[in-house]
Amino acid sequence: MKLNFRKLFTIKLFTILGVIVLVVALLLGGSATYLIRASWPQEKGVVQLSQLYDTVTVYRDRWGIPQIYANNSHDLFLAQGYLHAQDRFWQMDFWRHLGAGRLSEMFGESQLKTDRFLRTLGWARIAERELEILPAEDMASLQAYAEGVNAYLATHKGSHLSLEYPVLKVLNPNYQPEPWQPLHTLTWSKVMAWDLGENMQKEIERVILLNTLPPERVEELFPPYPAEHPVIVKNFNPPNRNKYRSISPGKNQPEENSFFSDNMSLNPWKSVREKIIALNEIVGPTGSAIGSNSWVVSGEKTRSGKPLLANDPHLGVQMPSIWYENGLHCTVKSAECPYEVTGFSFPGVVGVVIGHSDRIAWGFTNAMADVMDLYVEKINPNNPDQYEVNGEWVDMEQVTETIAIAGEDPRPIVLRYTRHGPIISDTYPKLAQLGLLPGNDLPENYAIALRWNALEPARLVSAILNINRAQNWPEFRAAAQFFDIAQQNLLYADIEGNIGFQMPGKLPIRSRGDGRYPVLGWRENAAEWTDYVPFEDLPFLFNPPPGYIVNANHAIVDRDAPYSIAKDWDYGFRAKRIVEAIAESNRLFELSDFQQLQGDNTNLNAEIILPIFRSLSFSETRLETARQLLVNWNEKNQIDRPEAALFEAFWKHLLAETFQDSLPLEYWPDGGDRWMQVVKLIRREPNSFWWDNQITSARETRDDIFENALVKAVEELEETFGPDPSQWRWGDLHPVTFRNKSLGESNIPAIEAIFNRGAFATSGGNAIVNATAWDAAKSFEVNWIPSMRIIADLSDLNASVAINSTGQSGHAFHRHYQDQIEPWRNLKYHPMASNAAATLTLIPSSHSQRH
């Protein structure tokens, strides 16, 4: 989604003029200073809040990171809500409208299609059901948080709330932020679950590719996880292993639904894909880069004799960061006030998501679990609101909602649901004209429904708060049972020296198949979800003999596991490098070693490619010079190295030369870990189908394609940097620009200049531990990053360090808006416990509430 304000501005000329006047004022002075500084938070002094029970003290360090001290849980979370609103309310307001499918209320008709799709998914309605099952203690925390946000809103409006609101007012004069509600916090979990889900897009990709490629070629583009790469839980043997023997282990092979490859109309699939793309432009890009790094070592491998734990979640680039660092401290820990935690929260969400308490530390990585299935539903040709179940037409459940649109009349929409979930495509009639093969049991009309565990009530907020209260491994595991959706690998360490791993979440048990392909929903043998895997049967580790655990989105279990978690794992290149660095080292690790490892730029793709170059030679001088650069390279994507620039330019053109002739534009290789594995396998076949360019009359081999790609890589670098290879710099070719996810993508350069920051040269790359990912089908620009980095030292938790990717503040031009970008890209950190630079005291007013 792009908030294309140029399109909106064509409605009224005075709107364009109003924005121009505002931007000129901001950029040239006059009222600029007032407008810019009006929303900056009060960091010192005293603020009276009637909602408080007692005094709260907030210490901010030199980075603007607050540590909150309160005498009770109510005041602790109220203060967190107040501070989130101080620093990030625009971000919170934008995300809650996204989660509820209400973007049109803010930005007008241009967001109507996205809102329709979001309403179909029904995140807000599911969140309303979640409120009903929340424990009273957690509901009280959500309410206290909302009170804090609303206390700030009560005294801050318009430009005093955030700089974005004066810009929005020109476009939408009547917009006023509504009070915060616990419901708004719960919709966040759905947005994050979507951001971390990928397998639905792969199902669609397989279907579309089957229309131009035979099944065996499609399977070559989705190879199995490499047996030589690490697995987290080896020889996985759950307590109830025999329970899963009755489940068919077979795949949903395309031949079971043979019309996918020859006769299925692509229109509904492309319609769904377009909706996904529109939503992902807001939430974050998807692709091979999705994931995170996390690892922990026991005291046997550290100089201190206590564990060290590292985590860096990989998310889409945005401004401000998705993370907000803070500490939540009960002045005296007690049963009523059990919190002593420091780490990273989400603005809009109560508690600390990743961090440490006074006894434990924890981190997350995406488990890559397959929890999304697509069902092709047969639609009654005489009644589009009926679908077939067991040979009978059944009425769909229908929900009518109204979408409010800024500046226009509201639009009613009707949402349709089947037993498998919401209809996420438009019905496409009359497939007969497509030349169907006789005998296929095809519907005249069909639609696509989505089954997803996040479309059921979940307890993610309870999981976060219970983890914040946990004091040991049993309590941590008990908290993990509430982590229903957005499946994560949870990594653990404690001050007693224990380390652990737990995969939580509602993992579906299918009656057959593994979820890799869509299935026919009307058939009796469709791959139905019969149950969820019980928590006690989900993979976990506690103090494993090697003394370390590595999580990098790679395979959790071996191929002979009794049930399927996923088939589309990350292919384990990052995991392989991290395991090598830990397992093959004889030294005792210190915190600085983990800092160095988080910034590791070793490119394992080079191990695949460079041996081929060592067997080649070129008569043309500049090509041979380029080849020599590569074969003498240290295989690290360092920011200032010409070899890294040359290798990645070659990789981009190698993928284009090899695959673009055979694949549709929307599925050209992005260059991530999956494509590394594909090339790793076909490199052994110099005459593979994939090496031959289908457009030319000649029969190309692998070596021909290598030479063609190297020629184009050298030409591109010479055009960009000049003919001297010593002037080629990977960081200059591979910049990151931090963009505001709303106004920063307005397509108006003056507005984007206010809210965006960059470009900044970076090191790293795809499937590298320092995971600054890029899309080889588009540009070298970074689109996924380590969104923050944290290292917890269990020998002295006050020595733990972290860094955010942008800064604490969401206010453009504030000193903390971008002050962490430079240390982030240079692998520098700040102490998580640091000296106070400013003190703010929140006190109850004379008419305050009381216990």
Image (cartoon, helix red, strand yellow):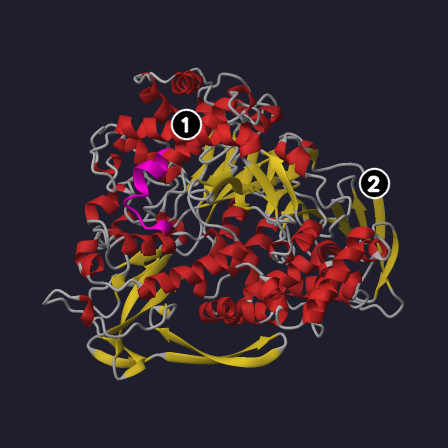
* Magenta region includes residue 594: no
The residue stretch that appears in magenta: 654-665
Quarter holding residue 518: bottom left
From the top left corner, tell me how far across and down residue 823 is, in percent: 67, 33
Image disc number at residue 286: none
Q: Secondary structure at mark 1?
A: helix
Looking at the image, which residue is at 33% across and 18% down?
618
Q: Earlier in the sequence, mark 1 or mark 2?
A: 1
Looking at the image, which residue is at 33% across and 53% down?
205
Image disc number at residue 604: 1
* Magenta region includes residue 658: yes
In the rendered structure, which amino acid carries the disc numbered 2?
Ala
Tell me: 348 left or right of 298.
Answer: right
Q: Is residue 550 above or below residue 582?
A: below
Q: Are marks 1 and 2 in contact (CB under 8 Å)?
A: no
Tell me: 653 left or right of 782.
Answer: left
Along the line of sight, the residue nearer the viewer: 784 or 456:
784
Please name the residue that numbered disc 2 is placed on. Answer: 837
From the top left corner, tell me how far across and down residue 601 is, in percent: 51, 27
